[in-house]
Amino acid sequence: MSFIQIYEQYDWEEIKNTIYETTSKQVEQSLAKNKKTLTDFIHLISPAAMPYLEEMAQQSQQLTQKRFGKTISLYAPMYLSNECNNICTYCGFSLDNNIRRKTLSPKEIEQEVKVIKAQGYDHILLVTGEANHVVNINYFKQSIEQIQQSFSTISIEVQPLKQDEYEQLADLGVYAVLVYQETYHKEVYKQYHPKGKKSNFEYRLDTPDRIGRAGIHKIGLGVLLGLEDWRVDSFFNALHIDYLQKTYWQTKYSVSFPRLRPAEGVIEPNFIMEDRDLIQLLCAYRIWNEDLEISISTRESEILRNNVFKLGATTMSAGSKTNPGGYSVAEDSLEQFEICDTRSTSEIYHLIKEAGYDPVWKDWDKAYQ
């Protein structure tokens, strides 16, 4: 059974009603349980759980330190290309945006790697738009082969691929694949993705299954917070993670919390998510699943990032550039979105140290495979 079959057993409006009808007593019962279920996750993301945020934060912190210690893994995103064949109403790379497109050459990739390595990074996340005629499996393989001696951990966030293509990347030592459904609301998904391969809701929904079957070490999921009701979308994301963990149990999993940020030609958020909401969601994920890696990017503000890693986050980016060549080659090329926390890698490193945590550059080696 694939996740698509499980997904079709659930109704968006019914889940929404269940979330918003949660009572304080149900929240208290869920917080008191030793082993949490998806039903408990529903209770913890409900409006009824907001008065219990302090208790949730304490539980989240304790569970995180028990499982991960006081460590924060650091990574850098490297955008290889802003070329894209999709029209996505929320993305600066959308095909209908009249911008200068750029795909990094091997020489430009080398320049970017030098700058990123000089900052101390050993974990790189390769990011592209979705343009199969330019950035395809051959381009990915060439880029990975070029940089694989420079980084212990290489992750990718690119267009959904076929299973055999993921297998090729696994053979090259790719550690993780991040793929976000953006929203699990099938009826409105098409409105956000009117043109391009990304408009195929089911193909994207099936992508983590292909990644799992290919034997990739870690799968990263998430939704774009702001497209639809974050509570309902997050339930379906948790449902997806729950299925994957039971099906591909040897694989690790992570969740990210990208909130809709300003970018060239994008829509306004359909559903506003406040900082307190994000903290509630992060704590709910941690209390529900203590093995889950939780990532917080530079989309978030300095104030939030100064505190959120103490509550349950395990991975952070710093000094990020969201445009191809942004570190060294083309600093003025179009960004996918505006970052909010513009502090340098060194500043974030020392922030983590001063809080009594250990910034980790490397927590994986290809020899483990």
Image: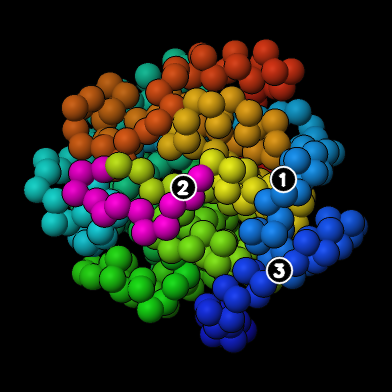
Q: Judge the density around disc 1: few (<14), some (14-19), many (≥20) Cα neighbours within 10 Å.
A: some
Residue 194 on image: x %, y %? 23, 70
Q: Using residue 188 as the reference point, say whether residue 95 is left or right of it.
A: left
Asked which quadrant contains residue 49, the reply is: bottom right
Q: Nearer the viewer, residue 73 or 136?
A: 73
Q: Nearer the viewer, residue 301 or 205?
A: 301
Q: Circle 3 sits on which residue? A: 22
Q: Circle 2 sits on which residue? A: 258
Residue 100 on image: x %, y %? 11, 41
Nearer to us of marks 2 and 1 is 1
Asked which quadrant contains residue 64, the reply is: top right
Residue 166 seen by the camera:
no
Residue 53, numbered label: 1
Q: Is residue 157 above or below residue 198?
A: above
- Mark earlier in primary sequence (1, 3): 3
Magenta stretch, main secondary structure class: loop
Kindly report the distance in space between the C-alpha atoms of the residues bearing marks 3 and 2: 26 Å
The residue that appears at 67% across and 72% down in the rendered structure is 21
- State the SS at label 3: loop
User: Disc 2 residue type?
Assistant: Pro
Part of the protein shown in magenta:
263-274
- State the SS at label 2: loop
Q: Is residue 56 above or below residue 10?
A: above
The residue that appears at 65% across and 48% down in the rendered structure is 280
User: Disc 3 residue type?
Assistant: Thr
- Mark earlier in primary sequence (3, 2): 3
